[in-house]
Structures are given as structure tokens and as C-alpha cells.
Image: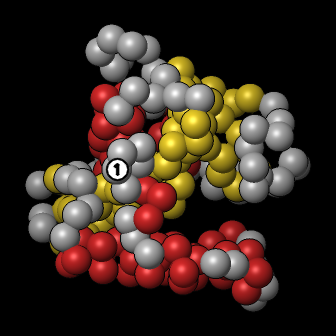
Amino acid sequence: MISVPRAQTPEDLDALRDLVRIYVRWVMADVLKSDDRGVFAGLEVELADLPGRYGPPGGGLALARLNGAPAGCVAFFDRRNSTLQIKRMFVAPTARGHGIGGRMLDRLLTEGQGMGHRRALLWTHLSMHSAEPVYAGGGFRKVPFSQEFTGATDGVDVCMKRDLPSGALT
């Protein structure tokens, strides 16, 4: 059974921190093939401060569970101008293939829309081919790199956007 509740309790936040650390180790070893600690500079401060910018009133954290065990995480924060930015979306390798990424994306887009957000943006490393179909299935489309994607690297990251209608999310 898959559930994707808001991460709120201290236990939820600890599980989310653990998943983000697994994600970082995976990205550094398998995606970037680097040991440059500067890539995720400030991450431990961000994790210690959770929910931080990912908390209400403009942000959210979700912790997916598969049969009760932590299986994935995703976060978003308010970028102003009715825009939310998605960060830290990750499904543990042992939980992949169950549609968890799509469920997490639906959850946070619905929550963000309910908070009044009208656009969502994200970027992903160009080598993360399995992430793009999940985002496309959630209504995101590739867009050219621009300064709007603060922190993304042109030629390294794939930038994506989606409008959130004022009515029911489709």
C-alpha cells in the first residue's frame, strides 16, 4: 500500500532527512561521479531546519510510504508570484516501479494549488532520464534555461514548468 502524507511529525522529518541523504550519496556517486562537497553546500543546515522554507504557509513536504516504510520524499517552496519550486524529489531504489514518484507529484501539486500557487517549476540533471517521464506525466513541459531557474546549470540541467489552473487540478 502506498501513502503520501504531509511530513509533519519529528519521526516523519527524520525519515525525510534520511532519504535526502541517501539521494545525495546516490547523486554524488552515480550521477555526478564526484566527491565535491560544494555541490550540496548548506544541505545539512537545510535538513536541520526542516520544515524551514518548505513549511506553511507557502511550502510543503511529503513523505511517501510503501507498506508503512519510508519510500520517497518531495518538497516545494514558495518562489513568490504564485510560483512554487519543487525540490528533493526522490524514490528509494528499493521502492521504484510502484508509481510513487507520480503519486508524490500529484500530492504536492494539489497542495500547492490549494495554497494559491498558479505555476510550478523544477529542474533535474540531464542524466536522470527516468525522472523526466514522471514530470511529463504530471503535466510539466521542458523549457529553455533562464535566470528563473536559480541554481540550475545551463547544459547540465533540464528545466521544466507547469501551469496550475485556478480550478480542479487535471
**Label 1 Cα neighbours within 10 Å, binned few <14 / some 14-19 / many ≥20:** few
Tell me if I can see residue 161 in this picture. yes
Q: Note whether 111 is above or below 28 in the view shown.
A: above
9 or 56: nearer the viewer: 56
Q: Note whether 36 is above or below 164 in the view shown.
A: below
Q: Note whether 46 is above or below 52 in the view shown.
A: below
30 horizontally vs 7: left or right: right
The residue that mark 1 highlights is 56
Name, please, the residue furthest toward the right: 155
Tell me if I can see residue 60 in this picture. no
- Residue at 43% x, 14% y is 165
Counting from the top left corner in percent of width and height, residue 72 is at 35, 62
Name, please, the residue furthest toward the top: 167
Counting from the top left corner in percent of width and height, residue 3 is at 17, 53
110 or 91: nearer the viewer: 110
Q: Secondary structure at mark 1?
A: loop
Counting from the top left corner in percent of width and height, residue 146 is at 83, 36
- Residue at 23% x, 63% y is 8
81 horizontally vs 146: left or right: left
Quadrant housing the C terminus: top left
Name the residue type under label 1: Pro
Snapshot quadrant of residue 120: top right
153 horizontally vs 61: left or right: right
- Residue at 52% x, 74% y is 46
108 horizontally vs 162: left or right: left
54 or 87: nearer the viewer: 54
Total numbered labels placed on residues in the image: 1
Counting from the top left corner in percent of width and height, residue 139 is at 49, 25
- Residue at 74% x, 43% y is 149
